[in-house]
Amino acid sequence: MQTQSGWRRPEILLLLMAVAVPLSFAAWQTLLNNFAIERAAFTGREMGILQSLREVPGFLAFGVVFLLLIIREQRLAFLSLALLGIGTAVTGLFPSVLGLYITTVIMSIGFHYYETLQTSLTLQWVDKSHSAEVFGKLIAAGSFASIVTFVLIWLADDQLQIDYQWIYLFMGGLTVIIALVAWLGFPMFPQKTEQHKHMVLRRRYWLFYLLTFMSGARRQIFVVFAGFLMVEKFDYSVSEIALLFLANAALNVFLAPRIGRLIGRIGEQRALLLEYTGLIAVFCGYALVETAWIAAGLYIVDHLFFAMAIALKTYFQKIAAPEDIASTAGVSFSINHIAAVVIPAVFGLIWLSSPALVFYAGAAMAGVSLLLSLLIPAMPEPGNESRLAVTSAQ
């Protein structure tokens, strides 16, 4: 990593940007179910469509590669952050089905393009020997910002009774301001390896692609339907959802860096086996739960497993050619969102007749991931990408 004196270093920039994202996205996510149901009369059908639309920019994340032909990766990250903030800021101004669809897409373009770029830049700037720990610190920084966001939302809604539109405007505006500070306050850091400016698909990355696909499919069950379960079945209010998210974030601040170090010690395969085994139990719990506080406990445990997904990123870093990182980060984000574009809408219809079936499907997806993770070698590297790997110059 490029050595810089003082605070103008790549790792500080990564932490600053990690803080900026939850200020908008956590606010959007916390308010969404209540705002959509109360102001736009959403049912599971409309929510499924909205979440599918939200994932379309993620599916198109490979477009980042082509944008790199005209703009540097670091600057594109700043612009993506700003777009995330703008999309969030205007959400409360359009309390209708169509309005929510449009503002969601704007917000999502910024969010997904930034997430793609953050992964790419981190893998390029951080050495393999401690990248898992750094990813853990980034999660912790984002979780700390989420705590601030949840506290502000709780105060605004529960104590001050501030309208949705002003909360959205304020939190989105903070992200835009941080994007400007990052642009003006940090230098352009050089890349150690020139990145491909075209799509890269390599046969030897097949296991990473499959695990990424299953991760995207499974994640939608949590992102879309676990929160919706809390509001629709257990009547959680905005302030209660904010407090639930607050508990998740507080645990992540403490545990995420430790989970990163744990992955560095036990390896990617064991970490992923632990994650997928736990998720099978959690999803089955969602299908059966009838008590609000037990559902909240499942939600917290479910969220903690997200930090274990660091292992998938570090697995790729160990098997990838350095020049493939930016392109494959975009391609993998697109693969991650193939199922995500379809699942919310389709499962939204299933939800109308059987919410439990939605969560049993999530458990089955976690089971497939568990089987795939058994193929990760103990020491992944180029030429040893899986236990079935045949060295190839693809």
Image: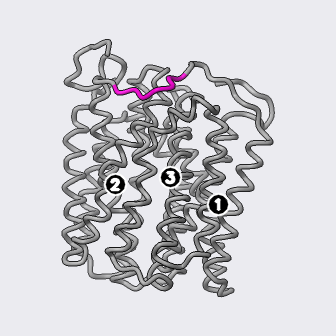
For badge 2, the amino acid type reads Ala
Give the label on residue 255, or none: 3
For badge 3, the amino acid type reads Leu
Q: Residue at x 66, y 80 (%)?
A: 156
Q: Nearer the viewer, residue 107 or 320?
A: 107
Q: Secondary structure at mark 2?
A: helix
Q: Is residue 169 left or right of residue 271?
A: right
Spot occupied by residue 186 in the image (x, y as percentages of width and height): 76, 37
- Specify few, some or many for label 1: CA neighbours under 10 Å numbering under 14, 14-19, or 20 or more: many
Q: Is residue 88 left or right of residue 42?
A: right
Does residue 197 show up magenta in the picture? Answer: yes
- Magenta span covers which residues? 195-201
Image quarter hosting the N terminus: top right
Spot occupied by residue 200 in the image (x, y as percentages of width and height): 40, 26
Q: How is this picture coloured?
A: one colour
Q: CA distance from mark 2 to mark 3?
A: 27 Å
